Amino acid sequence: MATFPNYVRRRKIKGLILDILIAVVVIGCIFPFVWMIMTSIKTRVQTIDPSVWFFHPTLENYRAIFQKRDMFMYINNSLMVVALTTLASVVLGTFAAYGLARFQFNRKEDVAYWILSLRMLPPIAVVIPFFLLGRFIGLLDTHILLVIVYMSFNIPFTIWMMRGFIEDIPRELEEAAWVDGCSRFQAIRRIIFPLIAPGVAATAIFCVIQSWNEFSLAFFLTSFNARTVPTTVTFFLSVLGVIWGEMASVGVVATIPVLIFALIVQKYLVRGLTFGAIKS
Amino acid sequence: MKKRKEHYWYIAPSLITLVVIVIFPTLFLWYVSFTNYDLTMGWEQRKLVGIRNFQYLAFEDKDFWHSVKISLWFMVFTVALEFILGLAIALLFNRRIRGKRLWMSFLIVPMVITPTIISLIWKLMLNTEYGVLNYLLSLLSLPKINWLGYENALWSVMMVDIWEWTPFVTLILYAGLQSLPQEPYEAVIVDGASPTQVFYYLTLPLLKPMIMIALLLRSIDSLKIFDVVYGLTQGGPGNATELMSMHIYRIGFRHTNWIGRASANAIVLLVIITILTTVLLRIMRRGTKEGY
């Protein structure tokens, strides 16, 4: 080492410290998730003993949540609500995005930003009128009510994401198709859609993640029939301390699909998180 | 001319849907906030009471002011820390690292896990008797902390929020750092600026639009927070973590059924969020004009 000049060694030490800091950040981010997975395969006694790190895993908790707690019903409800709201929002939103991307009209940006502002509404303010109206027309605790309410954040999101994706495609491609005799709609179907398909997929996945994770609205608007996976949190609030293992296995079942989806759209993550405002 | 209205057919379906499912219910919320409606009475029995609900919140409901105060404090503290940590981590990643893509994909974990699940897993980890955090403290011979007790509960909720959302700030600022233009850097380095000067006088100003977007999105979301608080503390112990959404929930649904008052409180939250949103959108609009 003595032959090395001092600054080389100093730079190496600095690099090492920075690497350690990154390791700390990464461990900090995933530790709670890892702890949840570990808790889900522990026995009841082991879950309340944090000094147990190596143990013989059990699937007892998973069996319990599917047999005793009817997880299938919650997953089924979630899947139905998520699929329908995503489908409806992506179809409606993509057309609106095309309208905003390809036409010029008065106060276009005002309309666009007004739509975006709806995405910021606090759920607790949205839920009171929906709770009352749902009660009046007897829609409380139905899938369709959640599907509709979730469109209030999925449509604005889709419009903003898809507008960016459509604007990324040169107008000339479309215009060439018109010259060749395609109608506007045919050009969308044959030229634009194949090009924005990855964007549509990414946007749909974001809608799936947001709707799957949504709790506040589902909590107020459902009571038994249409309860979604995130509302299962209420089981574990009163009787906690006994069934941490089951809680953790619900957590694993609920989060693994979202994590896989999130990894698929990782490339578009910043774009999605900022409603298309920042394209990286 | 037919062409001039063509855009309407593309936009109208979404616009009409949004008006029906957002504007109409919001107007209804305003209406309810001026009534004395209560879930235990029939809808026909409601009476218009003017601004009585707002007066009640302002002059009689001490818990309302408490919730406003801790909500604002929660917002300021979490967003400030998420910004500082998020920027530091973004800078940490902004150099050559082997396997960077993999390491960065771990950062996504906290913000995509279902928030109610986050709250429960943290509730287990923060348990005084058998939580892993106190266990790790005991390994370092440090005293146990009563994380969710009256004194510490709000700090713990803030800690969970910071854990959940710092990566969000990191990802946005990292994207910003990666897209910075090279030329100004070459110029100032030739001029002999120190790394600290480069950071304060060049990097931060160039990042400003991204920083503002990240901070405002976080501020709006942290004022809206409900799910994580509900799972972690339900607003307790006492009213230690009764943030605005939790207070609305308590007076409207949980303890009393005063929907009128809860609506008035929701209107207050709505107005605060609208102000922040207006600022955010103005910055985003300016940003798009400059080409970000």
Image (cartoon, coloured by chain):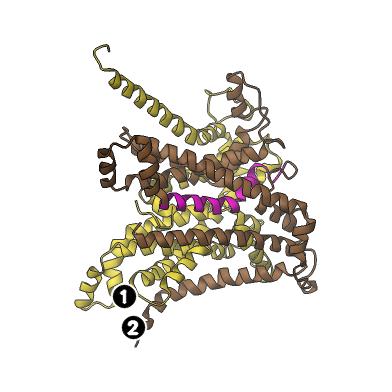
Chain colours: A yellow, B brown
Q: Which residue is mark 1?
A: A185
Query: Is residue B81 shown above or below B1?
Result: above
Q: Give the residue type that dot 1 points to.
A: Phe
Q: Is residue B257 visible?
A: no
Which is closer to the viewer, label 1 or label 2? 2
- Per the rendering, the mark at residue B3 is 2
Q: In the image, is residue B243 above or below residue A117?
A: above
At which x and y percent is residue A35?
53, 32
Residue A24 in which image quadrant: top left
Residue B230 pos. (x, y %)? 65, 47
Considering the whole magenta stretch, tell me its main secondary structure. Answer: helix
Q: Extreme top residue here?
A: A2
Residue B142 x/y as whole percent: 62, 21
Question: Mark 1 — on which chain does it sit?
Answer: A
Left or right: B94 in relation to B163:
left
Q: Is the residue A6 above or below the residue A70 in the image?
A: above
Q: Quadrant of the C terminus of chain B?
A: bottom left
Instruction: Specify few, some or many for label 1: CA neighbours under 10 Å numbering under 14, 14-19, or 20 or more.
Output: few
Is B212 rendered above or below residue A55?
A: below
Side (left or right) of A190 relative to B52:
left
Q: Position of residue B123 (x, y in %)?
A: 63, 37
Q: Residue at x 38, y 72 (%)?
A: A99
Span colored in magenta: B209-236
Figure quadrant of the N terminus of chain B? bottom left
Question: In front here: B101 or A134?
Answer: B101
The kind of residue tagged 2 is Lys
Q: Secondary structure at mark 1?
A: helix
